[in-house]
Image (cartoon, rainbow, N blue to C red):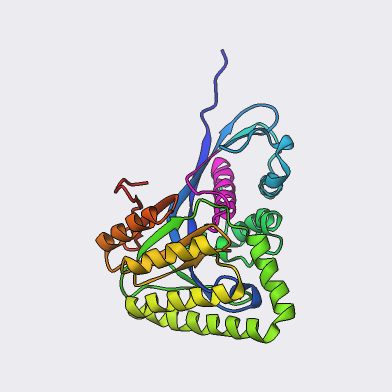
Amino acid sequence: MSTVSTKTGSSEAHSKLILVGEHAVVYGKPAIAVPFPLKVKAVVEQSSGKIMFESKIYNGSIDNMPMKMKGIEVCIKETLDSLKEPFENLRIRVESSIPLGRGLGSSAAIAIAIVRSLFSFYEKKPSQEQLFSLVRISETYAHGKPSGIDTAAELSECPIWFQKGKEIVSLITGDPLYLVVADTGRIGDTHTAVDNVRKKYLVETREVEKSLDEIAKIAELAREALLSGDMYLLGSLLYRNHEELKVLGVSDDGLDTLIEAARNAGALGAKLTGGGLGGCMIAIGKDLEHAEVIAKQLMKAGASKSWYFSSEDNILYVTEGEKE
């Protein structure tokens, strides 16, 4: 008589939003990131033979993964190596509601969920150091030299203050954040955006340094506004941050149109989030009802999808009012 193992391991990870400071963070400036309750779930099950992977973008053996998923393959191998377990006899399923290439940290979230689920399958729990190290493997393949802000934000349940090489600080907000996120429907080209800023820095050093310093000042002020609960000040700082990102050349007409639509809907603040040149933008509402109004206006202005939520309860809504 044969028996089928029902042993499984599973875990979830949420995505992230850069509130202020993207691009400047690459140059050692501070940034603030917040959790975004779009999630990815990974499930590990007992199988036989080669490790099989199931997801929306690839189904098959780990050994035959496309090059763009190489980081995940190596991350899985290194995780199993750290667990001292063989690279075989597993099925890994990934279900993600995080759109790819939108600056929401999908690659880090997927890696976090997979690493945690593998540890869970073998009835172990990774330390934060292990998680950072293993997820960084995947992120390095995805982004070249990641700052680490995606992983840090997605391992936190509250906003964080992040600066490369310095201790990550958790920020407890004085009042809830009512955030709206809109997807342009276009994949954000982070590599090109970062490269464009670097090229601009070489040619227009003084102008770029001025923008980077201004973004750093905005981040400092945003930190104080967040901690004190001054959401009107925080909103005005988001608008200022977006103007500097336009100077750096990482916004585009589609993002600017959505930000103007948010402004016309009475948003306290709005800006692109992530790499830019497509991807997503964010806006701050006065309350949850106002956030819903902004989200609907963003859809009318051309967004392919929009969400809104309160940082107080982290229940995510789409513009129709349905929970995601």
Q: Position of residue 183 (x, y in %)?
A: 47, 54
Q: How many numbered discs, if any?
A: 0
Determine whether 315 is above or below 226 in the image.
above
Determine whether 281 is above or below 87 in the image.
below
The N terminus - image quarter: top right
Determine whether 171 is above or below 103 in the image.
below
- Of residues 233 and 201, which is closer to you in this image? 201
Q: Residue furthest left?
A: 289
- Position of residue 24 in the picture relative to residue 98 (left or right): right
**Residue 84 counted in the magenta span:** no
Query: Which residue lies at the image location 61% right of the left edge and 74% below the top edge?
Result: 248
Residue 221 visible (yes or no): yes
Q: Image quarter for residue 297?
A: bottom left
Residue 314 visible (yes or no): no
- Position of residue 72 in the picture relative to residue 219 (left or right): right
**Residue 117 counted in the magenta span:** yes
- Of residues 36 and 281, which is closer to you in this image? 281
Q: Image quarter for residue 287?
A: bottom left
Q: Which residues fall within the magenta stretch? A: 94-123
- Of residues 32 and 274, which is closer to you in this image? 274
Q: Position of residue 222 (x, y in %)?
A: 43, 79
Determine whether 187 is above or below 226 in the image.
above
Q: Position of residue 301 (x, y in %)?
A: 40, 56
Query: Which residue lies at the image location 68% right of the left edge and 68% below the top edge?
Result: 196
Q: Residue furthest top?
A: 1
Q: Position of residue 194 (x, y in %)?
A: 66, 67
